């Protein structure tokens, strides 16, 4: 692996114009495809094997002309104090709005007059028009949305309060200015890390190119593959983070090789051969975790995972090919001006007296250890204390996760100044919270001798279920008259646990109803579908965790030639992801510090959040594990003792890993400003998870555990060592092929650092 990547790095450096042209051409092709593609199809959930999906499929079969998953909207009217919606003038304004909605678009399927359907509150101050559409929310034309927004303007002018709720107004989520701030912070961190505008700009440039290709490809294939708008957001989020990080590691290693006296082409080859190997395997762990989301068998989630995994693959390919090509264009400007001046001074010193050179070498030998070296020595002196503090701290953060409640966000979680939230509140006040998420019950009476009698019996049975506020009369939807729908209103808000209990109680009655009437009863609707999604995700959690952790364990075992190091990596990840879930619960469910993150209404955590965080965070956490521990493994393979290897790994990798973590946190935190609650929650969860994993698990717990394990950390049974392929991530084979390093002084300095580390351990 290292030898192949070494050759690839040198080739890309030499043929930089050709390599750069290929990537520019790919970006152009993807951009043209995106520009000429039709908009994404929809964001509808399809959950095979669940009762809610079975009911939707039955409706489509029995009533082909309808679209049970079409967009809906509620235009809510509220009368001024002292007036009623039944007043003549107010009634006329509402009825005119009904006519406007019917004529506003060809995509309108049905508009229900509130005075004919009884959609007027008991106290008479609130009424709503229910509008359904022939297509899903993401397929609605802008003209249709504009007509919906303009509806009721005359009613507003007359003094009525008019607000609009429902999914018909859903569009691409806005991420806000904080996303740009996240990228700006990344640029500052890169500039501080490298001290060079060119070196800092390379990771940003290549990450943007990679994300551009990835997002453009997703947009171009959206209609064909049924990709949603959220898919692009996730791909952008992960693509930016890993793209910057992977390029950061390659550029950093390239600069280190230059500092050791390598020629530029040779330095590019060695950087890609060593750091590039870590990038490839780190990328593989991310791809495994994202592609593994297909295990859940929710098509939308699977597509999100595959699309994001594709963006990660692009980021890896760019890092090992485009980065060395751009390094060829950059010349010596990739290092800071200070380093360039020092190099000139060193060259001048070589031409001076031998005594002056000796003094320069002595000054160099007295170079102070960096922060990474000092921290690693501290951990090696007190491994037990550091380990306990890290584990107990993450354990405390994880405590709120025990109260985790899952659900899917509704309009009640929207900011209070939005029309959707105002409509939600007006409906809750006027009709009860359950009216915001009515349940749909399908009565399949094809096997019944008396379909009408069976449907009526179902209605009476459901009416007596605890928590049911109202049940509509059966509405038969087909010519045969054997399929009916009932609308069931819960007493509780759609996202509550109480409404979930109502759904389960109705389903529990299904068996006895079928035995008594011959009719099959199915509960569906958006609320029931959300409940089924949550259950399906919970059922898939352990199999998915086992698959992802198992495959990644095997991959890391190949990389590190060890059993305990991959095991430690997996356990550390579990600790950080549970702690991150605890933080998500504290902020979004309990409301702690909610004002800081614009959390208007605390409520259940998005049902896909745990499994999604496991997938994404596991892959990203393994990035830091591979980057940091690979350097330790490299030092150990080249003859250093375990304690020495830990210090060497931190000496060369701690600063870069820290910069990479800050960059990734900044990128993810940028999405907290999104107007979409799901994107906001994902951004916060991933940002806090990376913080926990990078700075507590990888920077503290990992070196503490390695210090306690000693040589046994790198133990691997001989029979297993023979079976596993040797991918040479640490570059041992490459070093033998290339010969000794040009600077023997570096070996002497590393040996001195190693002796200092051993002395510290001896004092312990």
Image (cartoon, helix red, strand yellow):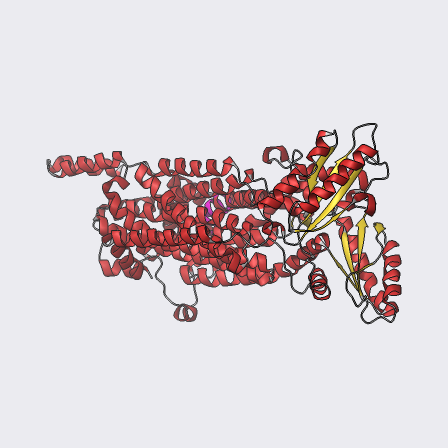
Residue 440 shown left or right of residue 48 in the figure: right
Viewer-nearest residue: 359 or 288: 288
Q: Residue at x 85, y 56 (%)?
A: 462
Residue 329 visible here: yes
Magenta stretch prevailing secondary structure: helix
Q: Residue at (28%, 50%) from the top-left corner? A: 325
Q: Is residue 63 left or right of residue 186?
A: right
**Which residue is more in the foreground, 184 or 486?**
486
641 sits left or right of 136 in the view: left
Check the image and name the residue furthest to the top.
82
Q: Which residues, given as a range, are shown in magenta? A: 695-705
Residue 679 rendering spot, x and y as whole percentages:
57, 45
Q: Quadrant of the C terminus?
A: top left
Nearest to the observer: residue 483 or residue 184: 483
Taking the image as shown, residue 379 lies to the left or right of residue 393, namely left
Q: Quadrant of the N terminus?
A: bottom left
x then y, percent, for residue 227: 54, 56
Number of numbered callouts drawn:
0
Q: Position of residue 111 (x, y in %)?
A: 73, 48
Q: Is residue 6 above or below residue 86?
A: below
Q: Is residue 353 above or below residue 491?
A: above
* Residue 573 counted in the magenta span: no
x then y, percent, for residue 184? 43, 36
Residue 526, placed above or below residue 515: above
Residue 739 placement: quadrant: bottom left
In this rendering, is residue 175 above or below 707?
A: above
Q: Is residue 699 magenta?
A: yes
């Amino acid at each position: 692996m290292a030898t192949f990547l070494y050759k690839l790095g040198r080739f890309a450096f030499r043929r930089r114009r050709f390599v750069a042209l290929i990537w520019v051409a790919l970006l152009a092709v993807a951009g043209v495809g995106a520009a000429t593609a039709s908009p994404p199809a929809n964001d509808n959930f399809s959950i095979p094997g669940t009762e809610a999906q079975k009911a939707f499929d039955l409706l489509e079969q029995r009533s082909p002309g309808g679209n049970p998953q079409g967009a809906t909207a509620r235009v809510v009217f509220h009368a001024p104090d002292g007036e009623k919606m039944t007043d003549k003038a107010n009634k006329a304004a509402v009825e005119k709005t009904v006519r406007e909605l019917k004529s506003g678009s060809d995509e309108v399927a049905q508009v229900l007059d509130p005075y004919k359907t009884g959609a007027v509150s008991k106290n008479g101050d609130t009424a709503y028009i229910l509008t359904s559409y022939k297509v899903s929310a993401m397929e609605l034309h802008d003209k249709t949305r504009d007509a919906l927004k303009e509806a009721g303007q005359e009613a507003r002018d007359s003094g009525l309060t008019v607000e609009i709720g429902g999914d018909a107004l859903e569009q691409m989520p806005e991420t806000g200015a904080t996303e740009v701030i996240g990228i700006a912070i990344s640029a500052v961190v890169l500039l501080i890390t490298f001290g060079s505008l060119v070196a800092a700009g390379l990771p940003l440039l290549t990450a943007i190119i990679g994300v551009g290709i990835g997002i453009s490809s997703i947009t171009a294939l959206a209609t064909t593959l049924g990709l949603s708008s959220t898919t692009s957001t996730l791909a952008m989020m992960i693509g930016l983070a890993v793209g910057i990080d992977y390029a950061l590691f390659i550029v950093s290693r390239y600069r280190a090789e230059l500092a050791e006296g390598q020629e530029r082409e040779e330095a590019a080859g060695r950087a890609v051969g060593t750091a590039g190997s870590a990038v490839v395997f780190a990328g593989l762990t991310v791809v495994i975790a994202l592609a593994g989301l297909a295990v859940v068998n929710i098509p939308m989630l699977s597509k999100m995972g595959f699309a994001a995994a594709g963006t990660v693959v692009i980021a890896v390919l760019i890092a090992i090919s485009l980065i060395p090509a751009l390094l060829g264009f950059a010349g010596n400007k990739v290092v800071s001006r200070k380093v360039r001046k020092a190099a000139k001074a060193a060259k001048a010193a070589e031409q001076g007296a031998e005594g002056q050179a000796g003094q320069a070498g002595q000054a160099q030998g007295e170079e102070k250890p960096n922060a990474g070296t000092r921290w690693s020595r501290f951990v090696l002196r007190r491994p037990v204390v550091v380990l306990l503090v890290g584990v107990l701290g993450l354990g405390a953060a994880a405590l709120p996760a025990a109260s985790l409640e899952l659900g899917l966000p509704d309009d009640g979680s929207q900011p209070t100044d939005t029309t959707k939230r105002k409509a939600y509140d007006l409906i809750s006040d006027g009709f009860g919270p359950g009216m915001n998420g009515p349940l749909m019950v399908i009565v399949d009476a094809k096997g019944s001798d008396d379909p009408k009698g069976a449907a009526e019996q179902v209605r009476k049975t459901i009416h007596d279920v605890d928590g049911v506020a109202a049940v509509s009369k059966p509405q038969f939807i087909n010519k045969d008259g054997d399929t009916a729908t009932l609308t069931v209103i819960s007493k509780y808000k759609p996202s509550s646990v109480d409404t979930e209990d109502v759904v389960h109680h109705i389903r529990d009655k299904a068996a006895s109803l079928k035995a008594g009437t011959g009719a099959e009863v199915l509960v569906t609707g958006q609320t029931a579908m959300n409940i089924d999604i949550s259950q399906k995700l919970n059922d898939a959690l352990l199999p998915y965790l086992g698959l992802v952790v198992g495959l990644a364990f095997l991959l890391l075992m190949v990389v590190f030639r060890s059993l305990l190091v991959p095991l430690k990596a997996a356990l550390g990840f579990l600790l950080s992801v549970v702690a991150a879930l605890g933080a998500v619960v504290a902020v979004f469910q309990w409301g702690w510090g909610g004002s800081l993150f614009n959390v208007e209404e605390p409520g259940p955590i998005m049902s896909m959040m745990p499994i999604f965080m496991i997938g994404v965070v596991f892959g990203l956490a393994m990035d830091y594990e591979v980057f940091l521990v690979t350097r330790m493994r490299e030092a150990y393979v080249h003859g250093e003792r375990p304690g020495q290897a830990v210090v060497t790994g931190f000496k060369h990798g701690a600063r870069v890993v820290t910069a990479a973590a800050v960059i990734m946190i900044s990128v993810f935190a940028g999405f907290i400003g999104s107007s979409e609650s799901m994107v906001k929650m994902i951004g916060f969860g991933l940002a806090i998870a990376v913080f926990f994993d990078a700075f507590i698990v990888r920077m503290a717990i990992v070196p503490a555990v390695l210090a306690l394990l000693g040589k046994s950390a790198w133990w691997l049974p001989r029979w297993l060592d023979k079976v596993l392929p040797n991918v040479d991530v640490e570059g041992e084979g490459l070093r033998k092929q290339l010969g000794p390093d040009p600077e023997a002084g570096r070996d002497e300095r590393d040996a001195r650092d190693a002796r200092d580390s051993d002395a510290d351990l001896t004092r312990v």
